[in-house]
Image (cartoon, coloured by chain):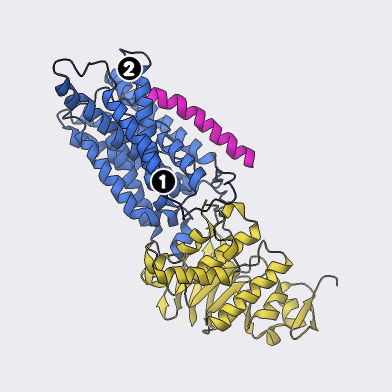
C-alpha cells in the first residue's frame, strides 16, 4: 500500500500540491489524471522520493520514503520520470542491467541475468538488446527505460507519462504490458497518463486531480462520467459506452 | 525542481552495425597493451644522455625510470579523471582543465608556497588537492543553478571559471615575484622528474584503483540524479566522492608535473566513441589511452628539437585543441 499523509509541496510562490491524504492499495494499475499543472507528476515524484515534500509523510509498502536506506527502498520501489534526456552510449542490455544495481551493486549474477532477460522479453526488446540507445527511436528507447525499471524487480512501479513518445500501436502495447506486469507479475503500477481513455481501458482505479488536490478517486466506471470529467478538465466532456469500457469524447462541443 | 537540461550529446554517431559490445575477445585490449608498452619502453631509451656511456646505468635509474613511471601514472590518472568528471556532469567536454580544477590546484600550490614556505611536497599536494576540490565543487554548484545546460555551455562555464582563477593566481604571482615559477608549473612537463621527486605520484595510482571500485556507481551517476536515486545510489555523496578523487589526482599531478591539458578530454571521448559508455569495461582502455597519448607526446617533445625539450603540455595542447574542435564539430553536425 502507498500512503500519503498531509503531503504538500510549494515551488517558490507556486502552490504545487496538497496538502494531500491518500491511500493507494496494493496491486493493480492506478492512473493519475488531470489537467496540466494539477500536481500529478509532483505527487508521483514525491512518492518516488525524487522530490522532497515540504510537509507530510509518504510510505510505500510500509517503508518511509525519506528515512529508509536508499538501497532497501530501491528494491521495493522503482520510478521512471517523463524526461529521460540522457542518451548515454549504453546498449539496451547494459541499461537494463543497471536496473539490477540495487540487488547486485554492479556485480551481475546469474539471477540478475535472468531478470534482465525477462524484462527484455517482456518489453519485446530481445532483438534490440545489443543496440546502442542512441541508435534507437524515441519509442524504442522509452521501452528500454521501462525494461530497466521492470528489471529492478520492485513491488511498486511508478511511471510518469510512460506513453510519451509512443505512437498508437506502441502506446497500446505499452499499456497492455503494464497491465500484464500488474496481473502476472503482481506489481502495483501507478502511472500518470494524459489520455483519459487509456486510464478507462486499462486502470483499476483512477485518481483525478486539479490544482494540487485530489478531487475524485474511484474505478473507471465511477470516475468516467460526464459530470466528473467536465469538472476535472474544465471542458465539456461526454462519456459514451465503449467496447467494454466507457470512452470520453471531448473533441468538439 | 525541473531542470531544462539539454543532454550531454553523445559524440559517437554510428557504431558499425553488427558490432556486439560486451561479447568481445580480449585481443584488442592485448594489442592496445602491447602498443602502450612499446611506447613506455621507447620512452625509457629516448634522451640525450648516452646510456652506454659511463654512469649510464645510474642515469637510467635516476631519470629515465622515474620519468617513464611518472608518465604512466599521470597519464592514466588525468585520463581517468576526465572520464569521472564527464560522468558526474553528464557532459563530454568536461575534464580537469575545462572545469577549472587544475587552475584551482595551481592556485593552491602557489598559496602553499607563499604561506608555508618551509612545507614539504606532501603539504603542497594536500593544499593543491584541497583547492582543486573546492574549485570543482564551485563548478558543480554553478552547474546546478545554470538552467541551460547545453553541451557547450558547461565547459564554457568551466573554462571561464578557470580563467578567472588563473588570473587571480597570476596577480598574486606578479605581486610576489613568483611569475617565473608559475610558468614552469602551468606548462606540464616531465623534464624535471627525477628519483626522489616523483614518488608521490603513486597516490594517483590509489585514486585509479578507487575509481575502478566505484565504476558501476559512476556509470549509474552518468544517467543523472533521478535515475541514480531510483537505483538506490546516494547521488550527492557520490558526487562528493568522485569530485574528491578527481581533485586528489589533479592536485598531485599539478604539483609534480603541471597541467596536462585535454588529456582527460580526448582519451575518454575516443574510447566512448569506439566502445560505448560502460565504465567498468572502458576503464582499462582509458588508462592505456592516457598513458599512450602522454608518453607519445612526451617522446615527440624530447625528440623534435634535440638536445632541447618541448614541454609535453605544449604538444598535448596542439593535439588536444585540434581534437577538441573536431569533437565540437562532430556534436554540431549531429544537431
Please report, as a chain letter, where disc 1 is located: B
Name the spot of residue B111 as percent of width and height, x first.
Answer: 26, 31
Please report, as a chain letter, where disc 2 is located: B
Quarter occupied by the C terminus of chain A: bottom right
- Which tint is chain B? blue
Task: Count up the numbered dots.
Answer: 2
Foreground of the two, A56 or B100: B100
Foreground of the two, B304 or B118: B304
Q: Could you tell me which residue is drawn at 49 percent across and 73 percent down? A: A7
Quadrant of the image occupied by residue A62: bottom left
Instruction: Quickly name the residue at label 2.
Output: B309
Instruction: Quickly name the residue at label 1.
Output: B27
Name the spot of residue B163 as percent of width and height, x first.
Answer: 43, 30
Magenta range: B310-335
Label pair 1/2, CB-CB below 8 angstroms: no
Q: Could you tell me which residue is drawn at 72 percent across and 68 percent down? A: A169
Q: Is residue B146 left or right of residue A101?
A: right
Which type of secondary structure does the marked residue at label 1 adopt? helix
Quadrant of the image occupied by residue A102: bottom left
Foreground of the two, B280 or B211: B280
Which type of secondary structure does the marked residue at label 2 adopt? loop
Q: Was residue B77 drawn as part of the magenta stretch in this picture?
A: no
Q: Which chain is yellow?
A: A
Amino acid at each position: 500500500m502507498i500512503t500519503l499523509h498531509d503531503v504538500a509541496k510549494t515551488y517558490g510562490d507556486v502552490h504545487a500540491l496538497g496538502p494531500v491524504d491518500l491511500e493507494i492499495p496494493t496491486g493493480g494499475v492506478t492512473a493519475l489524471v488531470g489537467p496540466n499543472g494539477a500536481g500529478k507528476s509532483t505527487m508521483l515524484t514525491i512518492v518516488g522520493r525524487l522530490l522532497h515534500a515540504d510537509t507530510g509523510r509518504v510510505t510505500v509498502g510500509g517503508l518511509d520514503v525519506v528515512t529508509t536506506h536508499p538501497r532497501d527502498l530501491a528494491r521495493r520501489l522503482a520510478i521512471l520520470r517523463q524526461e529521460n534526456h540522457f542518451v548515454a552510449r549504453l546498449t539496451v542490455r547494459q541499461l537494463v542491467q543497471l536496473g539490477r544495481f540495487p540487488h547486485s551493486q554492479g556485480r551481475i549474477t546469474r539471477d540478475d541475468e535472468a531478470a534482465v532477460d525477462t524484462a527484455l522479453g517482456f518489453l519485446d526488446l530481445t532483438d534490440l538488446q545489443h543496440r546502442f540507445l542512441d541508435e534507437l527511436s524515441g519509442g524504442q528507447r522509452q521501452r528500454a527505460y521501462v525494461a530497466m525499471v521492470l528489471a529492478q524487480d520492485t513491488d511498486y512501479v511508478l511511471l510518469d507519462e510512460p506513453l510519451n513518445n509512443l505512437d498508437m500501436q506502441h502506446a497500446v502495447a505499452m499499456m497492455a504490458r503494464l497491465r500484464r506486469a500488474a496481473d502476472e507479475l503482481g506489481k502495483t503500477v501507478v502511472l500518470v497518463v494524459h489520455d483519459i481513455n487509456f486510464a478507462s481501458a486499462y486502470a483499476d482505479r483512477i485518481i483525478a486531480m486539479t490544482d494540487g488536490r485530489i478531487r475524485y478517486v474511484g474505478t473507471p466506471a465511477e470516475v468516467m462520467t460526464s459530470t466528473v470529467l467536465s469538472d476535472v478538465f474544465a471542458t465539456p466532456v461526454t462519456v459514451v459506452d465503449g467496447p467494454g469500457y466507457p470512452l470520453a469524447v471531448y473533441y468538439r462541443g | 525542481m525541473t531542470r531544462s537540461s539539454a543532454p550531454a550529446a553523445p559524440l559517437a554517431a554510428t557504431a558499425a552495425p553488427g558490432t556486439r559490445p560486451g561479447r568481445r575477445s580480449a585481443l584488442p585490449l592485448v594489442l592496445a597493451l602491447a602498443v602502450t608498452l612499446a611506447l613506455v619502453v621507447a620512452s625509457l631509451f629516448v634522451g640525450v644522455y648516452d646510456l652506454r656511456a659511463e654512469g649510464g646505468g645510474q642515469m637510467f635509474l635516476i631519470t629515465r625510470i622515474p620519468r617513464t613511471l611518472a608518465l604512466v601514472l599521470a597519464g592514466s590518472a588525468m585520463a581517468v579523471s576526465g572520464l569521472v568528471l564527464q560522468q558526474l556532469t553528464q557532459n563530454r567536454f568536461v575534464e580537469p582543465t575545462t572545469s577549472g580544477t587544475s587552475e584551482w590546484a595551481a592556485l593552491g600550490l602557489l598559496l602553499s608556497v607563499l604561506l608555508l614556505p618551509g612545507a614539504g611536497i606532501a603539504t603542497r599536494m594536500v593544499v593543491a588537492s584541497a583547492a582543486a576540490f573546492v574549485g570543482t565543487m564551485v563548478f558543480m554548484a554553478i552547474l546546478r543553478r545554470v538552467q541551460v545546460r547545453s553541451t557547450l555551455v558547461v565547459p564554457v562555464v568551466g573554462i571561464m571559471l578557470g580563467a578567472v582563477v588563473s588570473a587571480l593566481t597570476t596577480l598574486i604571482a606578479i605581486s610576489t615575484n613568483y611569475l617565473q615559477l608559475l610558468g614552469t608549473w602551468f606548462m606540464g612537463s616531465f623534464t624535471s622528474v627525477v628519483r626522489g621527486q616523483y614518488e608521490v605520484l603513486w597516490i594517483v595510482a590509489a585514486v585509479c584503483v578507487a575509481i575502478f571500485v566505484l565504476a558501476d556507481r559512476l556509470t549509474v551517476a552518468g544517467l543523472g540524479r533521478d535515475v541514480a536515486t531510483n537505483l538506490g545510489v546516494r547521488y550527492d555523496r557520490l558526487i562528493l566522492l568522485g569530485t574528491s578523487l578527481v581533485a586528489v589526482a589533479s592536485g598531485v599531478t599539478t604539483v609534480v608535473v603541471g597541467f596536462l591539458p585535454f588529456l582527460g578530454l580526448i582519451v575518454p571521448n575516443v574510447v566512448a566513441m569506439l566502445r560505448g559508455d560502460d565504465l567498468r569495461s572502458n576503464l582499462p582502455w582509458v588508462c592505456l589511452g592516457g598513458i599512450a597519448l602522454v608518453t607519445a607526446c612526451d617522446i615527440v617533445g624530447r625528440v623534435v628539437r634535440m638536445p632541447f625539450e618541448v614541454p609535453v603540455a605544449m604538444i598535448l595542447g596542439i593535439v588536444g585543441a585540434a581534437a577538441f574542435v573536431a569533437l565540437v564539430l562532430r556534436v554540431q553536425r549531429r544537431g
